[in-house]
Image (cartoon, rainbow, N blue to C red):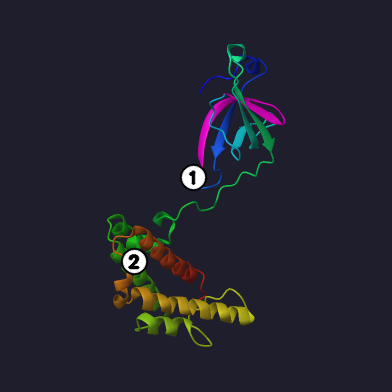
């Protein structure tokens, strides 16, 4: 990028970071120089800064100041008498607070340890259907061991989560809300066995689709975390 005109440099230059699409998966950052004032900023004429971009720079009191580019005016006059006066004039608006999404992307590394143990190597090697099968098998085995049952599949989940006094209570609320929560998760565990664990359900699975597999693994991870929170007597 071209340098700022000399008359701006006379009044002081600040190293700044310009952020495109802040807080999104498409966020991009680059560093440049600018002359910063309270309500405006001045940049070299070829700086790729646009309305909505966030500009970060050191706060003399400590920390970082964040400004949003509310308006961006490119001043590029022609003629030899204006040479060296080209610049971009940015007017600041109210900047959103700095935030980082707690989860930017779903990845297998963040799933439950039981899913990692049963499925991560298969997933990494591209065996997506097998990875999903092993993840849901691990749920079945875990529930069977929790209640000491010899059942499997849908019958096992009904035995563990169903009835007025379920062997694996997963509700976190009392009263009717707790009953609804227990019934809902009982349905999810039964549905997992019927719709995913059941070998006949695999006709619906796309064997070369890692995103679909990862979403199934995320579902398995959720069920394992619900078992973590269950109170087993």
The numbered disc on residue 205 is none
Q: Nearer the viewer, residue 149 or 152?
A: 152
Give the percent coordinates (x, y) of residue 177.
Answer: 61, 78
Secondary structure that dominates the magenta span: strand
Q: How crowded is the residue under tag 1: few (<14 C-alpha within 10 Å), some, or many (20+)?
A: few
The numbered disc on residue 132 is 2
Q: Is residue 159 above or below residue 102?
A: below
List the single residue furthest toward the bottom. 164
Which residue is located at x 50 percent, y 76 percent? 185
Q: Mark 1 and mark 2: span between their CA atoms?
A: 29 Å
Task: Assess whether residue 26 is covered by the magenta stretch.
Answer: no
Look at the image and give the residue range highlighted in magenta.
27-44
Q: Quadrant of residue 211?
A: bottom left
Give the percent coordinates (x, y) of residue 198.
Answer: 32, 77
Which residue is located at x 50 percent, y 87 percent? 163
Task: Assess whether residue 38 is covered by the magenta stretch.
Answer: yes
- In terms of secondary structure, where does tag 2 sit? helix
Give the percent coordinates (x, y) of residue 122.
Answer: 29, 60
Q: How many marks?
A: 2
Tell which tag, 1 or 2, sits nearer the viewer.
Answer: 1
Q: Is residue 61 left or right of residue 103?
A: right
Q: Quadrant of residue 68?
A: top right
List the single residue furthest toward the front. 79
Which residue was labeled with disc 1? 26
Q: Nearer the viewer, residue 90 or 198?
A: 90
Q: Nearer the viewer, residue 92 or 126?
A: 92
Q: Is residue 182 above or below residue 5?
A: below
Give the percent coordinates (x, y) of residue 180.
Answer: 57, 80
Lower position in the chain sequence, tag 1 or tag 2 = 1
Can residue 65 be spotted in the picture?
Answer: no
- In terms of secondary structure, where does tag 1 sit? loop
């Amino acid at each position: 990028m071209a340098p700022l005109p000399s008359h701006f440099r006379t009044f002081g230059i600040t190293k700044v970071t310009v952020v495109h699409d802040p807080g999104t998966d498409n966020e991009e950052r680059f560093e440049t120089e600018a002359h910063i004032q309270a309500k405006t900023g001045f940049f070299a004429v070829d700086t790729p800064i646009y309305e909505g971009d966030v500009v970060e720079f050191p706060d003399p009191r400590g920390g970082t100041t964040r400004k949003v580019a509310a308006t961006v005016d490119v001043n590029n006059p022609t003629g030899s008498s204006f040479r060296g006066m080209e610049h971009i004039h940015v007017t600041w608006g109210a900047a959103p607070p700095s935030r980082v999404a707690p989860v930017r992307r779903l990845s297998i590394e963040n799933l439950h340890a039981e899913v990692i143990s049963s499925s991560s190597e298969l997933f990494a090697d591209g065996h997506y259907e097998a990875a999903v099968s092993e993840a849901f098998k691990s749920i079945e085995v875990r529930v069977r061991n929790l209640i000491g049952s010899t059942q499997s599949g849908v019958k096992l989940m009904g035995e563990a989560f169903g009835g007025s006094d379920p062997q694996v209570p997963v509700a976190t609320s009392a009263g009717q809300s707790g009953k609804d929560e227990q019934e809902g998760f009982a349905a999810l565990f039964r549905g997992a066995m019927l719709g995913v664990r059941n070998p006949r359900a695999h006709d619906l699975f796309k064997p070369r689709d890692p995103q679909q597999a990862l979403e199934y693994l995320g579902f398995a991870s959720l069920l394992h975390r619900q078992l973590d929170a269950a109170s087993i007597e």
